[in-house]
Each structure stands twice: as structure tokens, then as C-alpha cells.
């Protein structure tokens, strides 16, 4: 709350009645630059509080509003009848609303905090249709607001941001907590190099969100901060792993064979298209083009749509999935069992984002595979194309990437290259090793 402005004539009802006789204009006192509070004394009855605002930059530089009656002859109630201090508070609230309405900007009353910067940035993300807003908001509520939410942006320092960033990297990752549990479940503290790298990678992503919100606030002049504090706070280096797990053809077959029917269809869809879980569960029958053998993915992580080209095997799979269904029907739906008739029914609510984790862990164990996520099916699809010699630019288009950078980073080492061929063909033979009689053992298939 702003500090109350003293005025010997207006702050006491007895002084007002004695020193402020009736006149046609209110008695004015300045609360802050551009904002005045006025006391109007009529010939008879209760007086009234009036606020006046002057901002030269606005289209309507001068605005005035009646706030309520005075407490000259009755006790103030804080709503329609106001004391001098209550009138000041209401005048400042009115100023915030008037500036917001006149300028089109959300005007912050009081200190502009990190939480206020996030709220402003979130509204802009909604306006732009940011696809990953829900996940971003979850990261903000988990990592940013509890520690930095109440800190005034102008008082942020580089050291404070770096300590917050480092503490997040050293903390244990949170996992889904069982219903009714009193404490948040977490993984063990990161110990291995891969675990530490993963936590640093998470910390870097959250730092990027914080910087985006603060840069937006600075760009819209919602804060007077220079931006040096967060600009100079650098992310951890070398946190993005280039080692990507993927399934070979035999492992893909083993995984598909142990899946329950509804989840099996999802896994097959991922291995035929390289689509993400969220993209698959939103697909409708009309998105499958039988003539072109493609699947149209309207909503992707980047916000751009794409057409995923299908192999003959993939086209036959989607043709079977779409057969006999209406054009607006979802292609992938959960199977639910009616307890009375014990028959399978389609779940009208389809798959939810959290459904994949438990089932994926169970089917990996049943298939005798190292635990992997559903997203790694996308890696498996991409690696199979790379191994087959498909150009990286084509693979990037299939995955919905804007360029080949991500494909080269994760799968480039699998692609046949002119450099590898030249080295193996032209490099001299050193003659420093004589091959022995060691041969690789053939693995018997069950």
C-alpha cells in the first residue's frame, strides 16, 4: 500500500467542516505526480471525494471520477462512504484502471515483481497461441515463482539468479506423487554424469523461460530494470546430450508384440510417422489422406502444420485404422471395459498426456527392453530413416523441424558421409596390427 499523503485540512473530519466551506470547486491535494484527490463540500448534506488524473501522453490527458461520499456526518464503510485514507487508496486504484483502459496496457500497482512479469508474458503467450504454454506454466510454478516470484524485477541481481539457477541444477528431480501422499516424491539426488547433465539441461530451459518473461516486461516498459542482471546470467555449457536411444527393427517388433491393443496402435502410429504423443492422440480420420498416403499433423510443438509421408506398410495401417469411422472421429482412442458385459468400448475422452508413462514402463519390462519413454519412439523412427540413407533435410521435414540442425545433432553420426568414405578409402595402412582369430559371436534368435 502506498504511503498516505498528509493534509491538515482534509485528513480530519472536524478540520474539513471548519476550514473547508462550500465552494463550486473541490479542495485539491496532490497524491503523486498527475494524481489529485479533491474534497467537494456542498451547501447541505454530505461531501464527496473526487479524483483527477493528468497524463500528457494519453489521448484523454485529463480524467476525473467521483469516488464516494465523505465521512463528515457518518462512519466510513470503506465502500460508498470513505475516510480520507480510504479515499486515497481508492484514488490510486482508479488511476491504475484509468491508465490501463486508456493505454491498452496492464498497469502494475505497487512493486513490479517477477510474478507480475510472468503474468504479463503469459497473457502475451496466450494471445500468440503458444502451444506449449501449459507445460511452460508448470515449470514456472514449480521452479520460478516459489523462489523468485515476490522479488521486485528492478532489485534482481546477477548473483541471485545464478544461485537460483545452480540450486535448481543440484536439486533432485520431482516425479509424480501418489494420490494422498503428504510429501512430494523425488528421484535421488543426481550423482552420475548423465544425471547431472540432465538436471543442468532442465535448469537451462527454466532459465530461458525466466529470461523470456523479463525481456518481455522490459521491452513493454513495464519495468525500469536495465536487464543486465539476467542478461549476464549464463546457462550451463555442454548440457545437451548427443547420445539418443532408439530401437532397432527387432526391438520395435518385440515392443509392439507385448503392448495391449489400444496402446499398440499408438506405438505403431509413432513408429510409422515419427509423431509425438500429443500429435498422435489429436489425429482425426480426415487427417489421413488415402490417395497421397500422408498424415496431416495440424498442431505441432512448433505451431506449424506438416504432412507426414507414409510407407506402404504405414499407409495400410492407417487405412485399417480409418475404415468405417466418421471423418471427425479420433484415430487413436483408449479401450475401456464395461464391467457388466465385459466388452470393450471406446473411451470418449481418448488418451491423456500422463497415460503413456506407466504403460510404457510396463511394456518395456515385458519386452525385456531397457526402460524408455514414448518420445524415444520418435528417435527410433528418425534413426531408421538415417540408417536407410534418407537425406537429413527430408527427415527434418518429416519430424517438423525448421532445419536440419536437430537431426544432425542427434542422428548425424549414423548417416553415411563423404568424409567417412574418404578416410576409409584414402588413409594409409599403418601395418601395426595383425588380425587375430577373434570373431564376433552370432546371437541365436529365440
Image: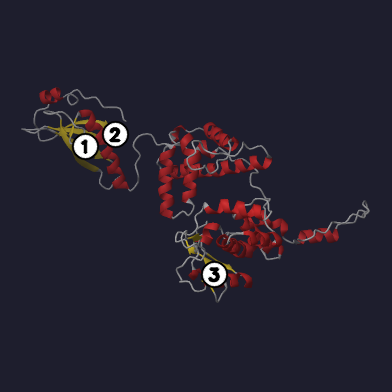
The residue carrying mark 3 is 321
- The one of 307 and 224 positioned closer to us in this rendering: 307
**Residue 385, image x, y percentages:** 67, 64
At a point 52% along the width and 57% down the height, the residue shown is 278
The residue carrying mark 2 is 33
Instruction: Tell me which label, 3 or 1, sits earlier in the chain.
Output: 1
Determine crowd level at label 2: few under 14, some 14-19, many 20+ residues with C-alpha closer than 10 A.
Answer: few
At a point 19% along the width and 22% down the height, the residue shown is 8
Determine crowd level at label 3: few under 14, some 14-19, many 20+ residues with C-alpha closer than 10 A.
Answer: some
- Does residue 168 appear anywhere in the picture? yes
Q: Which mark is residue 51?
A: 1
Q: Distance of mark 3 from mark 1, alpha carbons? A: 67 Å
Quadrant of the image occupied by residue 96 = top left
**Residue 42, image x, y percentages:** 8, 33
Q: Distance of mark 2 from mark 3, alpha carbons? A: 68 Å
Instruction: Tell me which label, 2 or 3, sits earlier in the chain.
Output: 2
Left or right placement of residue 267 versus residue 133 in this view: right
Q: Secondary structure at mark 1?
A: strand
Amino acid at each position: 500500500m502506498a504511503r498516505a499523503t498528509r493534509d491538515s485540512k482534509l485528513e480530519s473530519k472536524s478540520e474539513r467542516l471548519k476550514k473547508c466551506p462550500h465552494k463550486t470547486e473541490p479542495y485539491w491535494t496532490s497524491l503523486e505526480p498527475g494524481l489529485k484527490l479533491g474534497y467537494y463540500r456542498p451547501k447541505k448534506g454530505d461531501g464527496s471525494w473526487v479524483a483527477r488524473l493528468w497524463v500528457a501522453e494519453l489521448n484523454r490527458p485529463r480524467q476525473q471520477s467521483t469516488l464516494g461520499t465523505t465521512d463528515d456526518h457518518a462512519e466510513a464503510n470503506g465502500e460508498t462512504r470513505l475516510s480520507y485514507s480510504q479515499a486515497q487508496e481508492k484514488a490510486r486504484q482508479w488511476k491504475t484502471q484509468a491508465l490501463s483502459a486508456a493505454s491498452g496496457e496492464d498497469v502494475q500497482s505497487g512493486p513490479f515483481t517477477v510474478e507480475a512479469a510472468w503474468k504479463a508474458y503469459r497473457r502475451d503467450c496466450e494471445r500468440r497461441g503458444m502451444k506449449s504454454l501449459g507445460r511452460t506454466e508448470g515449470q514456472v510454478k514449480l521452479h520460478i515463482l516459489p523462489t523468485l516470484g515476490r522479488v521486485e524485477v528492478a532489485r534482481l541481481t546477477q548473483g541471485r539468479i545464478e544461485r537460483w539457477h545452480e540450486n535448481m541444477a543440484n536439486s533432485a528431480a520431482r516425479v509424480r506423487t501418489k494420490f494422498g501422499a503428504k510429501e512430494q516424491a523425488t528421484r535421488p539426488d543426481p550423482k552420475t554424469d548423465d544425471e547431472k547433465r540432465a538436471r543442468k539441461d532442465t535448469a537451462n530451459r527454466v532459465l530461458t523461460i525466466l529470461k523470456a518473461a523479463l525481456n518481455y516486461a522490459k521491452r513493454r516498459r513495464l519495468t525500469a530494470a536495465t536487464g543486465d542482471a539476467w542478461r549476464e546470467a549464463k546457462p550451463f555449457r555442454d548440457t545437451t546430450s548427443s547420445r539418443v536411444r532408439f530401437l532397432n527393427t527387432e526391438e520395435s517388433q518385440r515392443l509392439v508384440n507385448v503392448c495391449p491393443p489400444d496402446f499398440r496402435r499408438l506405438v505403431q502410429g509413432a513408429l510409422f510417422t515419427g509423431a509425438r504423443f500429443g500429435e498422435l492422440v489429436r489425429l482425426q480420420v480426415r487427417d489421413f489422406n488415402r490417395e497421397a498416403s500422408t498424415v496431416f499433423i495440424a498442431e505441432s510443438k512448433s505451431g506449424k502444420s506438416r504432412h507426414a509421408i507414409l510407407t506402404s506398410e504405414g499407409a495400410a495401417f492407417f487405412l485399417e485404422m480409418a475404415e468405417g469411422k466418421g471423418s471427425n472421429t479420433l484415430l487413436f482412442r483408449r479401450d475401456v471395459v464395461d464391467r457388466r458385459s465385459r466388452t470393450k468400448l471406446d473411451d470418449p475422452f481418448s488418451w491423456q498426456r500422463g497415460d503413456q508413462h506407466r504403460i510404457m514402463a510396463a511394456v518395456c519390462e515385458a519386452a525385456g527392453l531397457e526402460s524408455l519413454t514414448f518420445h524415444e519412439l520418435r528417435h527410433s523412427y528418425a534413426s531408421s530413416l538415417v540408417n536407410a540413407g534418407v537425406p537429413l533435410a527430408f527427415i527434418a521435414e518429416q519430424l517438423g523441424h525448421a532445419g536440419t540442425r536437430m537431426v544432425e545433432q542427434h542422428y548425424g553420426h549414423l548417416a553415411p558421409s563423404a568424409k567417412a568414405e574418404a578416410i576409409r578409402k584414402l588413409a594409409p595402412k599403418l601395418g601395426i596390427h595383425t588380425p587375430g582369430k577373434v570373431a564376433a559371436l552370432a546371437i541365436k534368435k529365440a
